[in-house]
């Protein structure tokens, strides 16, 4: 028996992609729910979704005072009312065809299934090398702290078993990097090391429309997730990029 699934998609100004990704998912997976967790878009994203008039597609407008990609995904996971919840991007870099394979792994009993990229080169050589180096650095600290790691720990395509992860999210909400992009890594930081993790390999593609929201604050927030020394690294990276670290984390100002 196949478990029920909600596809959680964090969005901000994705009017060029949002209706197309919804149609593609619903055409291939008519039983899946889609939950767009929107970070107060200023374009026509909401109108595009509402025009679909699909009861299984929800456009959820988040609190403007609690913005962040991490917060969007985690809140979506928390409110999903299905057996599984899956995070994916809105820009078609995560192929719709991969969703079936991930759900199939969840049906085998996985607590977590990570979409493992065959190659990251669609991001370009510079970003690919940077991503792999950052991941290796992060895994080193996870091993020091005796935390579970996975292959492709920076992946933005993964599925969770809701009854396993909902308590983790609720118990650790204030500790998560809510504005960060590496949600899988943050969940692993607080999850039980004995989780059953499965993988599904897929081809990572190029963005279909629109522009990436990647900015210098993303690596800073990623390093900030790595306990004490990670915060030191985050401060160094912030200085390299000319970013005010204490503007990002005012509570840490002495």
Image (cartoon, rainbow, N blue to C red):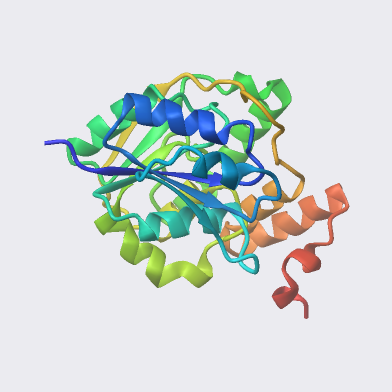
Q: Position of residue 209 (x, y in %)?
A: 66, 26
Instruction: Tell me which residue sits at (29%, 54%) in the image.
Output: 162
* Camera-nearest residue between 176 and 189: 176
Instruction: Tell me which residue sits at (31%, 29%) in the image.
Output: 29
Instruction: Tell me which residue sits at (33%, 31%) in the image.
Output: 199
The C terminus lies in quadrant: bottom right
Q: Position of residue 222 (x, y in %)?
A: 62, 51
Residue at the extreme bottom: 254
**Which of the 4 image quadrants contains residue 211?**
top right
Residue at the extreme left: 1
* Camera-nearest residue between 252 and 146: 252
Q: Position of residue 238 (x, y in %)?
A: 80, 54
- Note whether 176 is above or below 198 in the view shown: below
* Camera-nearest residue between 110 and 239: 110
Q: Position of residue 1 (x, y in %)?
A: 11, 36
Judge left or right: residue 123 versus residue 202: right
Instruction: Tell me which residue sits at (55%, 36%) in the image.
Output: 18
């Amino acid at each position: 028996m196949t478990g029920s699934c909600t596809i959680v998609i964090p969005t901000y100004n994705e009017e060029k992609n949002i209706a197309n990704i919804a149609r593609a998912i619903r055409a291939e997976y008519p039983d899946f729910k889609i939950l767009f967790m929107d970070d107060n878009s200023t374009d026509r994203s909401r109108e595009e979704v509402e025009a679909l008039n699909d009861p299984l597609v929800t456009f959820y407008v988040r609190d403007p005072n609690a913005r962040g990609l991490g917060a969007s995904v985690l809140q979506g996971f928390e409110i999903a009312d299905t057996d599984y919840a899956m995070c994916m991007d809105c820009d078609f870099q995560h192929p719709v065809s991969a969703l079936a394979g991930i759900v199939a792994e969840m049906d085998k009993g996985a607590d977590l299934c990570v979409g493992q990229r065959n190659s990251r080169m669609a991001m370009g050589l510079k970003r690919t090398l940077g991503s792999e180096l950052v991941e290796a650095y992060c895994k080193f600290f996870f091993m020091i702290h005796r935390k579970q790691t996975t292959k492709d720990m920076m992946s933005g395509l993964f599925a969770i078993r809701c009854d396993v992860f909902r308590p983790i999210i609720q118990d650790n909400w204030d500790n998560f990097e809510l504005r960060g992009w590496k949600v899988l890594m943050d969940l692993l930081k607080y999850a039980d090391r004995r989780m059953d993790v499965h993988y599904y390999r897929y081809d990572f593609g190029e963005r279909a429309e629109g522009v990436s929201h990647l900015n210098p604050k993303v690596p800073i927030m990623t390093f900030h997730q790595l306990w004490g020394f990670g915060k030191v690294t985050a401060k160094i990276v912030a200085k390299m990029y000319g970013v005010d670290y204490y503007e990002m984390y005012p509570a840490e100002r002495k």
